[in-house]
Amino acid sequence: MSPQDLYRAKLTTADDAVAQIGSGMNVSMGMATAEPPALLEALGRRIENSDFSDLCLWYFHSLEAAGKTVLREDLLDRVRPHCMFLSHIERTLIKGDPSGSAYGPIEFVPVAFSGSPQLLSERLQLDACITTVSAMDRHGWFTFGTSNDYTSAAARSARRLIVEVNPAMPRVFGDSLLHVSEIDAIVENHCPLPEIVCCTPSAEEQVIASIIAGMIDDRACLQMGIGTLPAAVCGLLEDRKDLGIHTELMTPALARLIECGAVTNMAKATYRGRSVFTFAMGDAAFYDFLDDNPAFHSLPVNLVNDPRHISKNDNVVSVNGTLQIDLGGACNSEHRLGRQYSGSGGQLDFVRGATASKGGKSIIACQSTARDGAVSRIVPVLDGPVTTPRNDTHIVVTEYGWADLRGKSMHQRADALIGLAHPRFRDELANSVR
């Protein structure tokens, strides 16, 4: 049977595609821009209109497509969201939970991003995987588009793979191919991908970005986290030469460095000449640039985020944010105001990978205060879990400067970090260690 005949044989409606998903099943969905809106809408209707219970949904980083369907508050007595990285969707559900629980109706699953493919494919038997893919080529191949991450492993380990084909999903190069013969059901849905627009950096973030940019030399290999600060750093690197990219998240800010010629990837030891990523988020122009562009190379997250793989490249610079840093250098990057805020993601993966890289720098950055200056982000004791242990923290940056913690004693670390705190809190912090 030709690929085109296979495609037609498997093409169905969204309602028919999810008809075999039932109570007590483990289902994984594509994350972020790979959420399949038509399939999620059909699954939401099925849950709402049938005798349904205990559907275990496994995923990272949801967006509105899930928030308006399977993660609706009125369905959470039948859906158990096993979330490994919270977005504003889950934070809203937790905040509105009358029990006041730190996790509310969310079954939060702590796991490193790099460990999620093994969790979903080996530790768990998935009954179904649903995700958005790019259009099929004439040889029968789709790609996972913006989301290789854990999705490629979940797709191949699940008993049933259901894909939503969206021509707006970029076709990407790398280890991202999926053949029509591997798929059980196909649904077509042509709609714009969700767009993530970066805000304008604050004055403090601009200062921090300037400090970080000053640490990034020609031929460095970049990993940038999400948000206005990493974007501001990228905006200051357009005069660099032969930068490389090996990053968890591909963003418009990194793509602009490719477009302007600052990134060539010619100094990398792995995937020379190509920018490596595992998932991507941005705007329509960014998705268009990503589409069918051999400058990009998509890989599963267990490879991209493996510290041993990261460190094969020299001069890796990893830039990530945090919510709190204690006076020993431990970072809480996922818990705030007594509740889970996000997740550990890949922060520690890249902290360790960059630190092990020859000439590498792991940078943890944050503004010195939160809540409009009311509280210090540098604290005697963390309010939440340790995302990056003090043993691993390398360079810390705030708007008051930077400190290299490697090789420093606890007293030296405390002195250095107090110097990065807002002046209003320095005496209080100093008294806490006397």
Image (tube, rainbow, N blue to C red):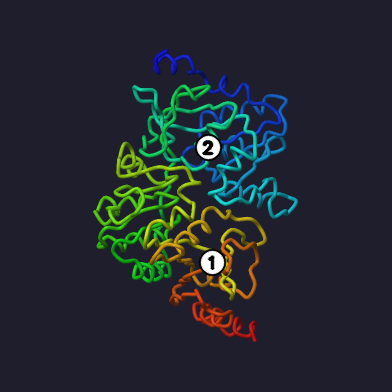
Q: Identify the residue at image location x=44%, y=35%.
A: 144
Residue 392 bears which disc, if any? 1
Local crowd size for mark 1, using a 10 Å CA cut-off: few (<14), some (14–19), many (≥20): some
The quadrant the N terminus occupies is top left
Q: Secondary structure at mark 1?
A: loop
What is the spatial separation of the Cα atoms under label 1 and label 2, in whole angstroms? 29 Å
Q: Identify the residue at image location x=25%, y=62%.
A: 239
Local crowd size for mark 2, using a 10 Å CA cut-off: few (<14), some (14–19), many (≥20): many
Return the residue found at the far right: 99
The quadrant the C terminus occupies is bottom right
**Badge 1 vs badge 2, beta-carbon distance below 8 Å:** no
Question: In the rendered structure, which amino acid carries the disc numbered 2?
Answer: Ala
Mark positioned earlier in the residue sequence (1 or 2)? 2
Q: Which residue is mark 2?
A: 153
Residue 225 bears which disc, if any? none
265 or 167, nearer to the observer: 265
Q: Identify the residue at image location x=60%, y=50%.
A: 111
129 or 357, nearer to the observer: 357
Q: Identify the residue at image location x=49%, y=67%.
A: 366
Q: Secondary structure at mark 2?
A: helix
Measured from the top left, where is residue 393 in percent x and y? 52, 68
Measured from the top left, where is residue 173 in percent x and y? 35, 38
Question: In the rendered structure, which amino acid carries the disc numbered 1?
Answer: Asp
Q: Quadrant of residue 241?
A: bottom left
In the image, residue 4 above or below residue 144: above
Q: Quadrant of residue 123?
A: top right
Measured from the top left, where is residue 48 in percent x and y? 66, 28
Measured from the top left, where is residue 182 in percent x and y? 49, 25
Count of numbered circles on the image: 2
